[in-house]
Image (cartoon, rainbow, N blue to C red):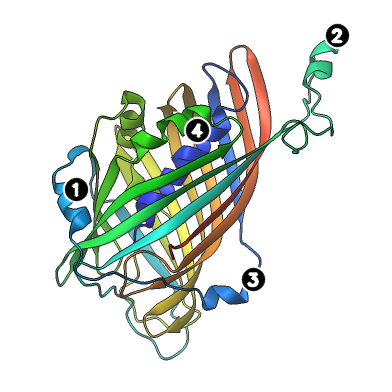
Amino acid sequence: MFRPRIGMALVVMALFVASCTNGSTQPTTTTEVEQSSPQPDETLVDADCGTVEHGSSVLTLRYNSATEIATVPRSGSAITVVATGSEPRERLLFDLAAGDRLAMRVTQQVTVADSPQEEPDATGDEADETDSGVEEEASGHPAGRRVSVISFIADVEVSKVTETEFVLVTAFSDFVVEGEGVDKLAAQAEHLESIMTRDTISVSGSLIESQTATTGPLETDIVAAFESVPTGGTNSISPFPDDRLGEGAVWTTEVVAASQGLDFESLMEQTLVSRDGTRLTLDFSSEQQMPGHVLDDAATEEVALTTTGSSVIALDQPGMCRYEATGSGELTTAGSGQTVTQEVEIETTVEPVG
């Protein structure tokens, strides 16, 4: 559903936060993030899917008057069904109605902790200066450990529906950016609220085209970030297979996308844990390769993301009922004559507002 845009927005912001925490002015960053599945949660199956507003055209009209800044075409994908699951089996197809609208709160906590240096200089001075220690700073967190929270509302509206596809328009608002190393991102929150997206998706969940637009003046670096990242190629959702599937079904999807001359690859495995009418509970894991690109004053060499988590979606409404993912990894930043390795932990949740 809306996850192609939201997923990449979170990745972009997480990299921004992490790369700004070591004080380097022009760092070069290599990121390895491995995400692990959240603990089993009985409430996930009973997730509140929120209240859908019907007959809305507010976001569609707003997008039509906005200025488009980026378009990402259809991504190539290959789906392999590993297991069709148990009976009864049915096609997994979205059945949406134009004008349906749902708002969701997206929250991501990013924790960056300094790792002890493995190779101090000959004098030992550098090791003394960079020893992370265990003492606490004024913030209450251990020294060398920074916690930042990025939260915003994604308001999703079904703009158009045909027999084979539908169009989702998404607006972002109510940005909350707290913690250490996020001053610049916090200052840009107002500009980020002018971003809107329009995604054309097949009834089987395949992303056909993604567009980004702005409703007001936008800083050049923010525009460049959205122009240089093919959100459709690094999303956290993949198309449903054409096969009839039942509970326990497993399928993998390979997605290859290109943008600004860069190739993006993603391999996702999904498991249909349960189905109750139009509601699906899914477990997922993915491996994504994002090539180097420039984000603000940080140049990322390559980002490798391994993600696992769970989600609950309803085939007859936009957005998601629930999304949970947790993770950890390492971030190595080189720049301004220094190299810093940091441990990164990421926790992400998405749920309807109200």
Q: How many marks?
A: 4
Viewer-nearest of labels 2 and 4? Answer: 4
Give the Cα distance between marks 3 and 4. 30 Å
> Are the residues at dot 2 and dot 1 in contact (C-beta closer than 8 Å)?
no
Residue, far top? 123
Up/down of 246 relative to 110, above or below? below
Q: Earlier in the sequence, mark 2 or mark 4?
A: 4
Screen quadrant of the C terminus: bottom left
Q: Earlier in the sequence, mark 2 or mark 1?
A: 1
Q: Earlier in the sequence, mark 2 or mark 3?
A: 3
Number of other residues with Cα within 10 Å of mark 4, as a class: few under 14, some 14 to 19, many 20 or more: some
> Are the residues at dot 1 and dot 4 in contact (C-beta closer than 8 Å)?
no
Viewer-nearest of labels 1 and 4? Answer: 1
The three-letter amino acid code for the residue at tag 3 is: Pro
Q: In this orientation, which residue lies closer to the viewer: 134 or 93?
A: 134
- The residue to which callout 3 is attached is 40
Give the Cα distance between marks 1 and 4. 26 Å
Give the Cα distance between marks 2 and 4. 33 Å
- The residue to which callout 2 is attached is 123
Q: Earlier in the sequence, mark 1 or mark 4?
A: 4
> Are the residues at dot 2 and dot 4 in contact (C-beta closer than 8 Å)?
no
Number of other residues with Cα within 10 Å of mark 2, as a class: few under 14, some 14 to 19, many 20 or more: few
Which type of secondary structure does the marked residue at label 3 adopt? loop
Viewer-nearest of labels 2 and 3? Answer: 3
Give the Cα distance between marks 2 and 1. 60 Å
Q: Which mark is residue 63?
A: 1
Number of other residues with Cα within 10 Å of mark 1, as a class: few under 14, some 14 to 19, many 20 or more: many
The three-letter amino acid code for the residue at tag 1 is: Tyr
Which type of secondary structure does the marked residue at label 1 adopt? helix
Q: Earlier in the sequence, mark 3 or mark 4?
A: 4
Which x, y percent locates residue 266?
43, 50
